[in-house]
Amino acid sequence: MAAVIIDRQTTALVVDSTADLPDNLLHDPNVTMVPLTVFFGRQAYLDWVELKPAEFYEKLKTESQLPTTSQPSPGTWLETYRRLRERYERVYSVHMSSLLGGSYATACAAAGQIDNVTVVDSTVVTGGIALLVDRLVERLERGTTQQEFEAFIAHYVAHKTFFYLLTTLEYNHKGGRLSTASYLVGNALNIRPVLVMDEGRVQMYRKSRGVRAALNHLRDGFLERTKPGVMTYVGLSHGLNLEGMAQLQELILGTDRVIDLRPPNIVGAVVGTHAGPGSLGLSFIQE
């Protein structure tokens, strides 16, 4: 049996807007982004379409209540898949961790009604998804087999790392994820949590005293989870924190690892609601 070819002519990628794609991927001809809806009170906005990150973070600072989000309907996914299947032989739909939201399950329900649509639980969010899409687009560009393409997806899900640094505790407190006592103590001690997503869940990696110590923990975690002499693809994420991202980039590039630094992404409304402005993310995979 002849190998199934995966390339730009045969294959499309779909993401939900929690991928927070950088511009090069957001406008890539083979990538379709389906937005979640963000609600500030009764006002609804399509994530990344009607509400870009800069406007979102301004509203986040001034609104008294945190926004809520709503995932796309099964019908929206089905319409998207049908439209793409008219042009492409195959569709791969990549989603945020199924343990954090329902878009994966909803997309699976829609994909069950049309052939040659594969739904992927990335087990991460924001920059972790963006880095996966980056690596898949590179494979579409050079062309590969379906076997290799799907083997890489499985490799990425199993072996990637996504670290996340909160530079403020305020929005975790507002969202009810941090008690008032913990919030007050954390602020008094200048605690900055470094989180990691393992097996689709957000877990504490390190508690740091100050942002600089947290950045050092990110670098140490990068070294701990990579091997020297192997190409490491790295993605940086930021909640409108260019200075912090530059500091993190300097630390990572200062290690002895062989690094291909991919275009950075901005953290959008869905993750930004809980992380607040200034957050930093570090995603990486060794292929």
Image (spheres, grey):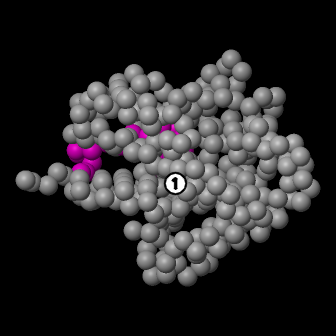
**Total number of numbered discs in the rendering:** 1
**Residue drawn at point x = 45 percent, y = 63 percent:** 159
Foreground residue among 103 and 167: 103
Left or right, 10 with respect to 210, comes to left
Seen in the picture, residue 46 relative to 234 is either above or below; the reply is above
How far across and down, in percent of the image, does residue 252 sit? 61, 72
Residue 170 placed where, x, y %? Answer: 81, 44
Q: Residue at x 58, y 55 (%)?
A: 197
Give the residue type at disc 1.
Glu
Residue drawn at 62 percent across, 21 percent down: 44
* As drawn, 99 above or below 66: below
What is the magenta range? Answer: 6-24
| Image x and y of residue 221, in percent | 62, 70
Q: Quadrant of the C terminus?
A: bottom left
Q: Where does label 1 land, which residue?
A: 199
Asked which quadrant contains residue 272, the reply is top right
Depicted 131 relative to depicted 225: above or below: above
In the picture provided, is 275 more to the left or to the right than 255? right
Q: Secondary structure at mark 1?
A: loop
Q: Residue 202: in sight, yes or no? A: yes
User: Is 177 in front, or is 272?
Assistant: 177
Residue 22 seen: no
Instruction: Find out whether residue 278 is within the magenta segment.
Output: no
Identify the residue at image location x=39%, y=45%: 120
View extreme (top): residue: 42
> Which quadrant holds residue 62?
top right
